[in-house]
């Protein structure tokens, strides 16, 4: 055999060995033990590749949905497939499940921060401005804004930013991704305490991620307080849970003949067994020292919540009260302590705010219709067909989630297991909407507080001893529906909630060049500039009517009364006016031309997406 023939044989052997090795690797990756990791790795890879096709500053009335590439949807599907593949194991391994959830969180909640050059959401810039103000002066300004009466987060952020040598905006961009990952930690504890199957516990986390379209997880007191709230709930259901008897008054009401008859009638209509067993897992015994330590942690967290937000302490007080009345917690007086802290803070440290604002605080109590109309009705006015699609998805996702949770509760009870603790945690926050004057946004907060227990209730459909082909099919449909509607609900407002770099540059220019005491006139207060004691931002609604002469009259009146007036026009205002208010697509450019034509304004700064104009006193101008 010649050398040439020998080399050919060796090459053939190497090729065969290489082919066999590749086949072995591919075969191993296709097995259950590797498929979850492979799917997650591919999901993260495809997601990263999809980002170059997503341009948030060019979003349409449907947000980013129209520009999501096919590989983005494949990344979402692979993240779910990776989790589904791993939970086929008995028991599922923690590391692949965590990797699957990280991939799912990246796709769902990492897309926006990964594609936006500057942080989104105008309210986040206000939070950063408050934090910088506290870091510089060391004292809040409650007269400037009501939120300054609850300064705990602002103070902590300002100190952290100063210690790190960064601006407070540094915390903004990736906050939604980080917070959603952190939410999963207490949620996993809640799932472990109420679900029997490891599969169901991991799946509950995926439901939460798919259901959290609410857009309240930007860097803010309510977002951080939600994490603290879930931590308190996790400790209660894991350490201080009980199935004891209710207080005597509650037992008397439940035993009242009329009430008992109605309850029995409802139970029969729903075909629920009378002798159902509590579905919560047994509480492991702990030492007195350990219990005292955990109780002190709960109290510390409760105080931090009270000092940092107006709404969250109320929700926590209501939930703790109902848990105590239902005999579901050993800490029967915790709601009293939390209520005293809340009232004391509001009466003393927030006194500057509520004095003279009692109607703003209590004026909306019991006005359910106003809350609903503020949340839904006003948002449907002047909406395009594409905008209506986004709004419909924002109504459909919570509807699917709530109905599925009710079905999960019924499904579990129908098979002899009740989950009253989860039901209380899911329903009790609704009562807060009747006790506060928080505007239409209160419904979003209620959904946010209820989402974690609701996700666990849905996971009951696939819990140990409860899963059937029907319940599994229902759960798959829920996952499919929420996955399909999530981009519409979550990314639907991106056209005006994304703060373009040019908008941020314009507001930064104002902070550095506009004299102290000036008034900044805007058409719509949707811009990346926080409130400042040196500048006043006023919404001149008359300026929005570009086709009329009202802008000229408003401008002339402003110039005569205040020579320190400036005008700021930005892309975010333009998009908000077009998408939400129904203004013509060229309304802002037309407004700018009309303002310049008055001769009362002068352009002082122009960026890629914003313009800053100085108003001049010109008594001889046409009116």
Image (cartoon, rainbow, N blue to C red):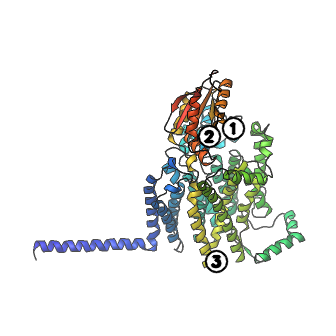
Could you give the CA–CA distance between mark 1 and mark 2, rounded to whole angstroms? 10 Å
Q: Are marks 1 and 3 in contact (CB under 8 Å)?
A: no
User: Which image quarter is the N terminus in?
Assistant: bottom left
Give 51 or 346, whichever is nearer the viewer: 51
The quarter holding residue 6 reads: bottom left
**In the image: residue 49, left or right of residue 376:** left
* Residue annotated with mark 2: 126
Could you give the CA–CA distance between mark 1 and mark 3, rounded to whole angstroms? 53 Å
Q: Residue furthest top?
A: 620
Give 494 or 588, whichever is nearer the viewer: 588
Using the rendered image of the protein, determine whether residue 416 is visible from the camera's viewpoint: no
User: Which image quarter is the C terminus in?
Assistant: top right
Q: Is residue 112 above or below residue 7?
A: above
Label 1 sits on a secondary structure element that is: loop
Tell which tag, 1 or 3, sits nearer the viewer: 1
Count of marks, rendered view: 3
* Residue annotated with mark 3: 465
Could you give the CA–CA distance between mark 2 and mark 3, rounded to whole angstroms? 49 Å
* Residue annotated with mark 1: 145
Q: Which mark is residue 400?
A: none
Q: Residue at x 48, y 50 (%)?
A: 55
Q: Are marks 1 and 2 in contact (CB under 8 Å)?
A: yes
The x and y percentages for residue 606 are 51, 33
Q: Residue at x 78, y 50 (%)?
A: 339
């Amino acid at each position: 055999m010649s050398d040439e023939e020998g080399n050919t044989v060796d090459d053939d052997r190497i090729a065969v060995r290489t082919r066999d090795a590749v086949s072995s690797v591919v075969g191993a990756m296709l097995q259950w033990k590797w498929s979850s990791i492979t799917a997650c790795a591919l999901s993260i890879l495809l997601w990263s590749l999809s980002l170059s096709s997503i341009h948030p500053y060019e979003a349409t009335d449907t947000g980013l949905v129209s520009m999501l590439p096919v590989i983005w949807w494949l990344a979402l599907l692979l993240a779910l497939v990776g989790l589904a593949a791993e939970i086929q194991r008995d028991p599922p391994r923690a590391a692949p499940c965590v990797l699957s959830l990280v991939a799912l969180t990246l796709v769902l909640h990492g897309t926006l921060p990964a594609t936006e050059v500057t942080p989104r959401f105008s309210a986040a810039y206000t939070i950063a401005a408050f934090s910088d103000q506290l870091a510089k002066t060391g004292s809040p300004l409650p007269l400037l804004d009501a939120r300054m009466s609850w300064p705990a987060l602002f103070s902590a952020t300002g100190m952290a930013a100063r210690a790190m040598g960064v601006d407070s905006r540094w915390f903004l961009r990736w906050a939604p991704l980080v917070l959603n990952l952190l939410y999963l930690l207490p949620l996993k504890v809640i799932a472990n305490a109420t679900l029997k199957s490891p599969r169901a516990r991991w799946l509950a986390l995926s439901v939460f991620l798919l259901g959290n379209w609410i857009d309240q997880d930007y860097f803010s007191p309510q977002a951080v307080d939600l994490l603290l709230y879930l931590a308190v709930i996790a400790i209660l259901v894991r350490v201080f849970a009980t199935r004891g008897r209710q207080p005597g008054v509650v037992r008397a009401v439940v035993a009242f003949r009329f009430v008992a008859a109605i309850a029995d009638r409802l139970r029969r209509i729903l075909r629920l067994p009378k002798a159902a067993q509590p579905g919560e897992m047994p509480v492991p015994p702990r030492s007195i020292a350990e219990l005292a330590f955990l109780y002190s942690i709960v109290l510390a967290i409760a105080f931090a919540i009270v000092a940092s937000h107006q709404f969250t302490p109320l929700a926590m007080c209501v939930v703790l009260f109902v848990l105590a009345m239902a005999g579901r917690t050993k800490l029967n007086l915790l709601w009293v302590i939390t209520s005293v802290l809340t009232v004391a803070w509001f009466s003393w440290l927030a006194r500057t705010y509520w004095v003279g604002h009692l109607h703003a605080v209590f004026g909306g109590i019991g006005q359910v219709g106003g809350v609903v109309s503020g949340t839904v009705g006003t948002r449907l006015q002047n909406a395009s067909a594409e905008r209506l699609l986004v709004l419909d998805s924002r109504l459909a996702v919570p509807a699917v989630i709530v109905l599925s949770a009710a079905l999960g509760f019924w499904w579990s009870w129908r098979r002899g297991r009740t989950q009253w603790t989860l039901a209380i945690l899911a329903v009790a926050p609704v009562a807060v909407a009747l006790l506060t004057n928080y505007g239409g946004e209160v419904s979003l907060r209620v959904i946010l507080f209820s989402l974690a227990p609701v996700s666990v209730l849905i996971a009951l459909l696939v819990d140990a001893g409860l899963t059937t082909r029907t319940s599994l099919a229902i759960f798959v449909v829920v996952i499919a529906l929420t996955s399909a509607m999530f981009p519409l609900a979550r990314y639907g407002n991106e056209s005006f909630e994304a703060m373009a770099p040019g908008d941020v540059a314009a507001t930064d220019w104002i902070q550095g060049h506009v004299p102290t005491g000036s008034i900044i006139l805007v058409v719509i207060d949707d811009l990346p500039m926080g409130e400042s004691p040196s500048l006043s931002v006023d919404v001149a609604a008359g300026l929005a009517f570009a086709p009329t002469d009202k802008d000229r009259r408003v401008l002339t009146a402003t110039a005569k009364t205040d020579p320190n007036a400036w005008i700021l026009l930005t892309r975010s205002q333009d998009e908000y006016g077009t998408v939400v208010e129904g203004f013509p697509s060229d309304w802002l450019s037309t407004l700018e031309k009309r303002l310049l034509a008055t001769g009362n304004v002068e352009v002082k700064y122009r960026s890629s997406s914003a313009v800053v104009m100085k108003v001049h006193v010109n008594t001889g101008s046409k009116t």
